[in-house]
Image (cartoon, grey):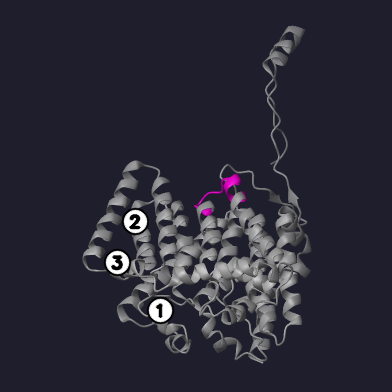
């Protein structure tokens, strides 16, 4: 009942903001991050026959449905702009929903809506907003960075208090919580998800040009990243920091920021801030061995998943039967088991296409690096197969990278009827030989063009 009431409220909001969906899309992203999946029942109630959705997923799906029926031309323009990618994503969503409806109960179906359909809806909605106003890409990046800063501060507070600052009872009710003692997660569902958010946000700081603002921003996000004890996150974060420093306009600014970060890091090392990370690198408690065994099992049974899977969430049952003691710790492998190898290849192929497009179009603001991190990080843990904000986060980054403005301009302008108008190309100046011919023909000096009429 609570889920239906929330859905009606989201539809009403989407109808009221049908001409300005951007605030609702960004609000849904914020809600997905500040309200963890383990606490979603406070808004939508307890699952009924396995059916439950995160409130932000409901809002995103409702917003897209309203846009589809009220602004079909704009939706069509976004689909046409990246037709092949949208076909691959749409096919994957269709397979996931169909398998979910065929499965026993509604858990798989609700996971398909929440972890596949809603994030793809976010991709298309941001595409609509960016085609209307390309400068909104900076606003998207600002929201992601602001969320990362908030979560980093919560992570530092959790490190000091040795307990979650919010939703503590919801986290403590989860069986996995006792295994992550000493690691911070903010308001996300796992420390690795906090590491993912911070790794995505760090390269986006390349658009900050003031050293006095850039240095503390990098230090805060890096400090939050250390509290997660994520090795892959630290590597991706280090690459992001190097990218940001390399992109500074002046060497002096880059050196000053680097010096401040180095001094902060040396102080943190002296007070034992990095001790937990060092211990985890020295002893990963069998994490690498478990991942190796998971890959071995998957490759040995690849024929079982070569066509279609058993629906979203099926990989957890397979890992239990295989005696892994954990998930397959790789979103691609888990999607291959859940949906089948071919749909998984299509889904991750679309993600890879977004990374290539960002590099080819040379989009600014650190988006190519953030998109690469959004592709790599889910391959190292069950980011996209858990009921959490990871799927929405990565597709928000991909949307800004694919539909955002190019560094040299050339962003298509939206047509008033919803289509896309190709940027006008100025006519080339007359050649010098033509100008000389005009003079020799007796027409005198060529006249300068005049612009008459009202503006």
Q: Is residue 351 above or below residue 49?
A: above
Q: Nearer the viewer, mark 3 or mark 2?
A: 3
- Is disc 3 in contact with disc 2, using a CB cutoff of under 8 Å? no
Q: Is residue 332 visible?
A: yes
Q: CA distance from mark 1 to mark 2?
A: 30 Å
Which of the image's four quarters has the C terminus?
top right
Q: Is residue 17 visible?
A: no
Q: Can you give x and y, in whole percent of width and height, for residue 20 in the image?
A: 65, 66
Q: Which residue is mark 2?
A: 215
Q: Nearer the viewer, residue 175 or 75?
A: 175
Q: Is residue 281 above or below residue 319?
A: above
Q: Which mark is residue 180?
A: 1
Q: Can you give x and y, in whole percent of width and height, for residue 224 in the image?
A: 37, 68
Q: Is residue 48 above or below residue 35?
A: below
Q: Nearer the viewer, residue 294 or 213?
A: 294
Which of the image's four quarters has the N terminus?
bottom right
Q: Nearer the viewer, residue 229 or 8?
A: 229
Q: Can you give x and y, in whole percent of width and height, for residue 300 in the image?
A: 62, 68
Q: Can you give x and y, in whole percent of width and height, for residue 267 in the image?
A: 23, 62
Quadrant of res 393: bottom right
């Amino acid at each position: 009942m609570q889920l239906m009431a929330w859905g009606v409220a989201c539809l009403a909001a989407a109808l009221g903001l049908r001409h300005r969906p951007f605030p609702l899309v960004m609000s849904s992203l914020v809600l997905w991050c500040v309200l963890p999946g383990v606490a979603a029942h406070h808004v939508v109630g307890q699952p009924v026959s396995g059916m439950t959705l995160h409130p932000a997923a409901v809002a995103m799906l409702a917003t897209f449905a309203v846009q589809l029926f009220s602004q079909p031309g704009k939706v069509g323009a976004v689909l046409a702009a990246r037709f092949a990618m949208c076909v691959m994503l749409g096919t994957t969503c269709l397979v996931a929903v169909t398998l979910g409806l065929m499965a026993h109960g509604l858990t798989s179906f609700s996971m398909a809506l929440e972890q596949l359909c809603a994030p793809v809806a976010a991709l298309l909605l941001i595409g609509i907003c960016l085609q209307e106003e390309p400068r909104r890409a900076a606003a998207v990046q600002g929201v992601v960075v602001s969320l990362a800063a908030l979560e980093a501060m919560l992570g530092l507070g959790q490190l000091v208090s040795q307990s979650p600052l919010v939703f503590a009872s919801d986290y403590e009710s989860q069986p996995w919580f006792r295994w992550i003692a000493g690691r911070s997660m903010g308001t996300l569902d796992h420390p690795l998800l906090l590491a993912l958010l911070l790794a995505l946000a760090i390269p986006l700081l390349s658009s900050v040009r003031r050293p006095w603002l850039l240095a503390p921003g990098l230090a805060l996000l890096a400090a939050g990243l250390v509290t997660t004890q994520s090795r892959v996150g630290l590597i991706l974060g280090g690459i992001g920091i190097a990218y940001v420093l390399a992109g500074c306009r002046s060497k002096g600014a880059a050196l000053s920021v680097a010096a401040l970060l180095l001094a902060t890091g040396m102080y943190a090392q002296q007070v034992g801030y990095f001790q937990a990370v060092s211990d985890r690198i020295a002893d990963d408690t069998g994490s690498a061995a478990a991942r190796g065994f998971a890959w071995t099992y998957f490759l040995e049974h690849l024929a079982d998943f070569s066509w279609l899977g058993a629906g979203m969430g099926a990989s957890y049952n397979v890992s239990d039967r295989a005696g892994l003691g954990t998930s397959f710790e790789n979103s691609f492998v888990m999607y291959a088991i859940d949906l089948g190898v071919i749909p998984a290849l299509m889904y991750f192929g679309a993600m890879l296409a977004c990374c290539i497009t960002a590099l080819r179009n040379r989009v600014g603001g650190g988006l190519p690096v953030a998109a690469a991190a959004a592709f790599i990080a889910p391959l190292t843990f069950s980011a996209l197969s858990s009921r959490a904000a990871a799927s929405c986060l990565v597709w928000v980054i991909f949307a800004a990278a694919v539909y955002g403005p190019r560094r040299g301009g050339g962003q298509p302008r939206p047509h008033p009827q919803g289509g896309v108008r190709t940027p006008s190309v100025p006519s080339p100046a007359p050649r010098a030989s033509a100008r000389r011919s005009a003079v020799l023909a007796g027409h005198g000096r060529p006249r300068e063009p005049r612009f008459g009429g009202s503006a």
